[in-house]
Image (tube, rainbow, N blue to C red):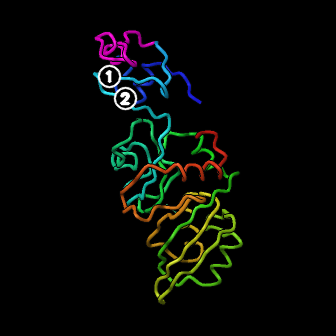
Amino acid sequence: MSEMIRIDKLLCEMQIGSRREIKEYAKKGRIKVNESVVKNTDLKVNPEVDKVFVDNRKIEFARFEYFMMNKPQGVISATKDEKDMTVVDLIKDNLRGDLFPVGRLDKDTEGLMVITNDGEMAHRILSPAKHISKTYFAKIDGVVTEEDVMKFSKGITLLDGTVTKPASLVILKTDGNTSEIEVKIYEGKYHQIKRMFAACGKHVIYLKRLAMGGLMLDDSLKTGEYRRMTDEELKRMTEETGSIHQ
Ligand code: URA
């Protein structure tokens, strides 16, 4: 369903300028809606029907944007940071300026990160009530045993006494010194995977998120690469979380 939106709000959201700048552009006759020059920025337009131009350049409108990224190590999952590069800084072809990452990965964790401006969807993905699983691949310093698998399946008591929900742990391979595993958790406590292994006396040396619910990291994305999510992926996410958009 298309909603009417003020022309200055639309242009602001599409990062064309501040409200004040847009008022100036309008005064100078630089803004057109369909065939007409618009001098009054109170005007409401229907972004799905009306064509908006600034200096004769057509402005594309997106109410929501959704990106999937293979987050690299060394980049933080935040919007802005004084010191470090953020996942939002890595996105270059966004239309909107209000993107944020859905949830957190540690600075040294790689893998699936959803970046959007859809707060409602983010909330639903992260809501404990939705039980959206998160699947990780990890390399562990130490030999992961069937006893660890059992402990994970019952829920682990972390070193600070916090108890996690049951998680499924699969040992992929182990060579006597290190192990490769896949683990699925249903919550998102701070440093959860690292702390679960620490509670078993083991250290995570590499961690990568592979999936969030049914949304799988596109394995053609190299670390640091991203792409827009497909309609199919959005539909699946919507079905899983019950999001009202799309
Ligand atoms: N668990 C962790 O320990 N770190 C992450 O980044 C994600 C899950």
Which element is circle 2 on?
loop
Which element is circle 1 on?
strand
Q: Ligand 1 closer than 8 Å to the CB at disc 1?
A: no
Circles 1 and 2 in contact, beta carbons < 8 Å: yes
* Residue of label 2: 59
Q: For the N terminus, which image quadrant?
A: top right
- Determine the residue positioned at 68% across, 52% down: 130
Kind of residue at badge 2: Ile
Q: Is residue 202 above or below residue 167?
A: below
* Mark linked to residue 231: none
- Determine the residue positioned at 37% across, 61% down: 223
- Determine the residue positioned at 45% across, 23% down: 50
- Determine the residue positioned at 51% across, 64% down: 210
Residue placed most toward the observer, 43 or 111 = 43
* Residue of label 1: 54
Q: Is residue 51 above or below residue 212?
A: above
**Could you tell me residue 158's position as x and y percent?**
62, 67
State yes or no: residue 176 in magenta.
no
Residue placed most toward the observer, 201 or 36 = 36
**Could you tell me residue 241's position as x and y percent?**
65, 49
Residue lying at the far bottom of the rendered structure: 176
Q: Residues within 10 Å of mark 1 (few under 14, many from 20)?
A: some
Residue placed most toward the observer, 221 or 103 = 221
**Could you tell me residue 91's position as x and y percent?**
36, 46
Q: Which residues are magenta?
A: 21-42
